[in-house]
Amino acid sequence: MFDNNTVNLEILKKRAFNLRWAAVPDGVIPLTAADPDFPCAPEIAEEICRFSRERYFCYGPPEGLPEFKNSIADYFSTKRNIVTSPAQVFPVDSAAFGIYITCKAFLSPGDEAIIFDPVDFLFRYSIETVGAVAVPFQIPPGPAAIDFERLTTLINKNTKLICLCNPLNPTGKVFTKEELTLLSDIAIKNNLVILSDEIWSDTTFTPYKYTSVASLSEEVNSRTVTITGFSKAYGLAGLRIGAVMANNKELFSKLIAASLHGSTVHGANVISQIAATTALTKCEYWLADFLKHLQSMRDICVDGLNEVNGFNCISPQGCYVAFADIKGTGKTSSEIHELIMNQAKVAVVPGLKQWFGEGAEGYIRLSFATSKEILQEALSRIKSVIN
Ligand SMILES: Cc1ncc(COP(=O)(O)O)c(C=O)c1O
């Protein structure tokens, strides 16, 4: 399912935007936005066709189709060990929108929210869009110890929210239960809402174990908003679908109000909800195979990057991106990005503040959700240009 023959470059060059095949010049391999080069599970396409053949595309309920709510609640309770029910989850038209409405619901202008550094730009973007201030908290790449003492010094009376990204894009760190406990203790002590973005949780590599922060205790569950999505594990980015869960009824009401779903100004479309439901109920076998493929691509990618002079790459514990330290080249992230783009014809994401925060300088990020052949070609081009 995940060999080179299944990568349809003709289609990808027409449909894969966001810095990918359709957005780069011919001949460039885009290891940029984390979006797989493989088609989705066939069951998802079949269900979309079956639904469409009935030719009814009516308004759905503002809080989501019952089958969607049931499958998400079942996923969170059985796979993530979180006490929940279908009434406490609703669909959003992307995990990105889930992050945004959480910021809208719990932050006022002038409030502060803690974000990891480095982390995906969506957190800072959403916090600043609602007029609040993003306060970065450094998370070292790999298994190095996190300085929780420092976290306490970043919190003041304006701090309202702490944003977790677990596994952490771009470093691929999977937080341990002990780390999450320390973090949630700080949230409880300071009465903070926890936003837990778990879109990458299904791509956790062996032997690492994934823990959802809301599973730690009833107290943590009652102050946590958990967000997931279907762009990463199931390759459905263009369907714009995700889910938000809050098991505290007060938090849930605020989130629904912020979503604007009740007024139909905003909402998650029904086809995407059907696709996501199918992913969770029928495509576990596909995800297991995808994960197996990703784990071997991860090893090829990390080994290949470590053969490049001046590069040093720690193996990610989760996420299908490699975050390579390029400081040994004596060049900046932008310079390496340009050199690789212009001479190796491989597009990567430079570690700029606009993408991942200040802590990303000196790094580049590469997605390895592609075939072995494409990945090896990209790595060999990078190696020959830099070495
Ligand atoms: C941590 C994280 N959250 C959210 C998203 C966005 O997901 P979606 O496509 O559902 O908006 C991404 C995409 O890269 C991500 O890395």
Image (cartoon, helix red, strand yellow):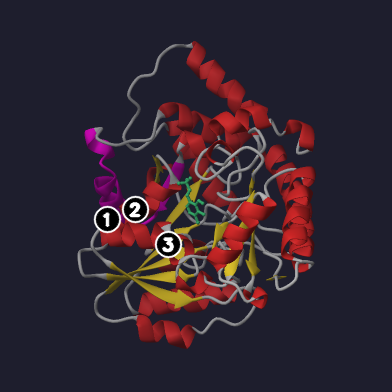
C-alpha gap between disc 3 and disc 2: 17 Å
Magenta-highlighted residues: 242-263
- Which badge, 1 or 3, is on the more N-terminal residue? 1
Residue 87 appearing in the image: yes
Q: Position of residue 27 (x, y in %)?
A: 67, 40
Q: Which residue is mark 1?
A: 104
For badge 3, the amino acid type reads Gln
Q: Give the secondary structure at mark 2.
A: helix
For the N terminus, the image quarter is: top right
Amino acid residing under circle 1: Lys
Q: Is mark 2 within 8 Å of ligand 1?
A: no
From the viewer's perspective, is residue 123 above or below residue 293?
below
Q: Do the residues under discs 1 and 2 have CB atoms within 8 angstroms?
A: yes
Q: Which residue is at a point 24% across and 37% down the rendered structure image?
A: 262
Instruction: Name the residue located 73 percent from the left edge and 51 percent from the top edge.
Output: 378
Q: Is residue 254 on the magenta stretch?
A: yes
For the residues labelled 1 and 3, say whether their Cβ atoms are less than 8 Å apart: no
Rounded to the nearest angstrom, the CA distance separating label 1 from label 3 is 21 Å
Considering the numbered disc 3 on the image, is that residue within a helix, a strand or a loop? helix
| Magenta-drawn stretch contains 199 | no
- Among the two numbered marks 3 and 2 on one chain, the one whose residue lies closer to the N terminus: 2
Q: Nearer the viewer, residue 45 or 73?
A: 45
**Which residue, given by chain and number where applicable, does mark 3 sit on?**
354
Q: Which mark is residue 279?
A: none
Dot 3: within a 10 Å radius of its alpha carbon, few (fewer than 14), some, or many (20 or more) residues?
some
Q: Quadrant of residue 38?
A: top right
Q: Nearer the viewer, mark 3 or mark 2?
A: 3
Q: Which amino acid does the dot numbered 2 rest on?
A: Tyr
Q: Could you say whether the residue bearing mark 1 is in a helix, strand or loop?
A: helix
